[in-house]
Image (cartoon, helix red, strand yellow):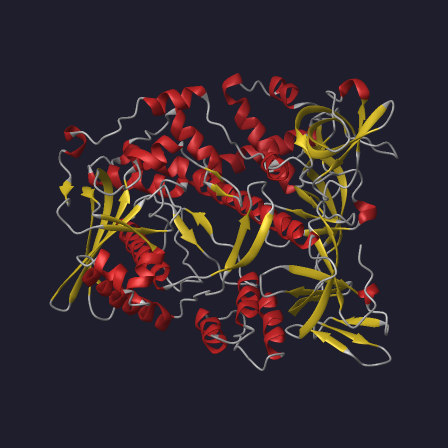
Amino acid sequence: MKQEVLQERKETIYQFICDELYVPMKAKEIAAVLNVPKAQRSELQEVLDSLLTDGRIEVSAKGKYTKSEGKFLVGEFTAHPRGFGFVTIEGQEDDIFIPESQVNGAFHKDIVQVTLTRGESKGKRREGMITKVISRGMNQIVCTYEKSKTFGFAVPDNPKFGKDIFVPQERSKGAVSGHKVVVEITDFGGHGKKPEGKVVEILGHVNDPGTDILSIVRAYELPVEFSEKIMNQVERVANEVSEADMAGRMDLRDWQTVTIDGEDAKDLDDAITLTKEGELYKLGVHIADVTNYVQEHSALDVEALKRGTSVYLVDRVIPMLPHKLSNGICSLNAGENRLALSCIMTIDGKGNVVDHVIAETVIKVDRRMSYTSVKKILEDEDAAEIKEYEELVPMFRLMQELAAILRKKRMSRGSIDFDFPETKIILNEQGKPVEIKPYERNVATKIIEDFMLIANETVAQDYFWQEIPFVYRTHDNPDTEKIRKLGTFINNFGYTIKIGQDEIHPKELQKLLQKIDGTPEEPLISRLTLRSMKQAKYATMSTGHFGLATSYYCHFTSPIRRYPDLQIHRIIKDNLRGRMNEKKIEHYEKILPEVAKHSSEMERRADEAERETEKLKKVEYMESHIGETYEGVISGVTEWGFYVELPNTIEGLVHVTSLTDDYFHYNESTYELIGDVTGKRYKLGQKIKVVVTGTDKIMRTIDFCISNEKCQTE
């Protein structure tokens, strides 16, 4: 529906509700009175929803609409385990704080109607009161079941849900104490009455290997199995590339080509070629042509869009596409003919892309390389490795040379390179964590990063100037207040950053990261700098990427595991084949906003699930280290205590109540806890020795105590 038509209809229907609707009516009753044809009733609902979001009308629990009596807003409620919460209004940057006393029966993820009780003033956020629950957000929830003689109750895994659920015995599906279960809520309770529900699935016992991760998979509603219809479709996909498939493509099979990935990678979706003629480098980034096997609107495509992304958990991968595709015909396996979409760039000695071609190609990879092997060749000068891959060594050295040029150019414009280690969690066969350590980047991972970045940027810039509907990867400027907090934090280490009147240039953050390079505080400051920035997202407008300091960026290089890349490939191929007519443009303009929005949401869901599994395994790991002493750095300070991060990336809380030698108050302006009598200070960045005193697998928390205090362990 066009915006102006929507606005016109909004005013007409709002006037009707104000002037004519003396008795509250449901949407279908309004439609009947206004003689709205059945075909247009979804449009009427769209108008009603929009008026509701604007706070101009209200809806009762029974779905009846009336004129709003006050200024109401509609949004999603995010609960906090402590009882309060926040309402996020679509299109508004700042959310509304809801005190515990004003939650009024709302649960986590509910769509609620809220009225403001305090506007924004003097740095204080808006406050509100929930006046109505419009729709429930969580109808099923993963819980730990506890059985009594005549009934049971389910304790939600998600602490944000806040209340145990009463389960009548006849609706327990035979669950026993300690079972992880999925509970469907049949009554949300209220007025002192607990929510009530029924067990719809038993996932396994809490002590069974894998049940903990499966519980997180179900809690985030991650789809695991593919339907029979999809698997039948996949079975019909050819195992080899046919001559017909290769017809009309640029044939690059005689180009020296490699893939470089982790040792355990099975879905190889990018390959590299590189030569140098005079002063110019010719870099080919060849990406698996997944769209050749995933047709638009097919069951496979619909499922891939629904999933949005592959999800990488500590003990499993939940793929976006079935393994037969992602590990088979779509994987750029060595020695096999493979279809690709290639971005072939001519790059000068300063890192400028002076020419490029985007083409449908057919390639054949010479060798499947690992990051470890390439590192051994380039960094360690390992004689055996150099001998094994001698015909490729000149190309690897050329790669190192070009990657350094590209990185230098990126850095000169202010691109921020977060070089802190990710967490590597090693599990045993029972799924128990046996080692947790930082996962370091090396010369080979950086080469691939640099090449993927330049390909993504080149493709995005090309399609921006063609003014064709597209999906971009955007990253907004950070919130000034968060950057000011970061500035205060780094002052503790003697560093400073220049903040303009309203914003910061990425170059300032890049300079900071260069200053801390190689220092003990580097991982901590890097991580806190990242936390102070906004999340990148997918969008149909190219508004720029702050972190990369570029005006144009997209995701083109991973169509096996990210839907936006797959969507971009489809657009590129339609354009290359001369099919980008007015009808196609209209089609993409219609579908892309929802593709971008949904893909961003699915990416956030995957990130949260990945973080939760990591947190769970970190808690489980520390369970067997209670009473042990570690040295860490204070990574966060709050009024209830301070967080300490250990060198292995594990973080725990020293609660203020465990600081027994003084009464400590929180200084909000300097982010310090200060002792009233002793003047002792605990501040961000401070090194400190702690003892592990306890863990909580439900809340995913680890408790520390300062090692010179009398620590009470569990």
Q: Residue at x 23, y 35 (%)?
A: 579
The residue closer to the viewer here, 290 or 394, is 394
- In the image, 522 versus 454, the foreground residue is 522
* Position of residue 633 measured from the top left corner of the image (x, y, whole percent): 64, 70
Circle count: 0
Q: Quadrant of residue 681?
A: bottom right
Q: Is residue 448 visible?
A: no
Left or right: 194, with 541 as reference point? right
Name the residue located 63 percent from the left edge and 75 percent from the top edge. Answer: 488
**205 versus 271 height, above or below:** above
Residue 653 horizontal/vertical position (percent) = 72, 61
Is any atom of residue 174 visible in this view?
yes
Quadrant in which the C terminus appears = bottom right
Horizontally, residue 461 falls left or right of residue 634, namely left
Q: Residue at x 23, y 47 (%)?
A: 342
Above or below, 56 against 681 in this view is above
Q: Answer with left or right where residue 132 lies relative to residue 383.
A: right
Q: Which quadrant of the figure has residue 560?
A: top left
**In the foreground, 586 or 315:** 315
Above/below status of 713 relative to 588: below
317 and 469: which is toward the camera = 317
Taking 366 as reference, is 397 above or below it?
A: below
In the image, what residue occupies the spot 79% across and 17% down?
170
Q: Position of residue 91 (x, y in %)?
A: 56, 48
Q: Position of residue 101 (x, y in %)?
A: 83, 47
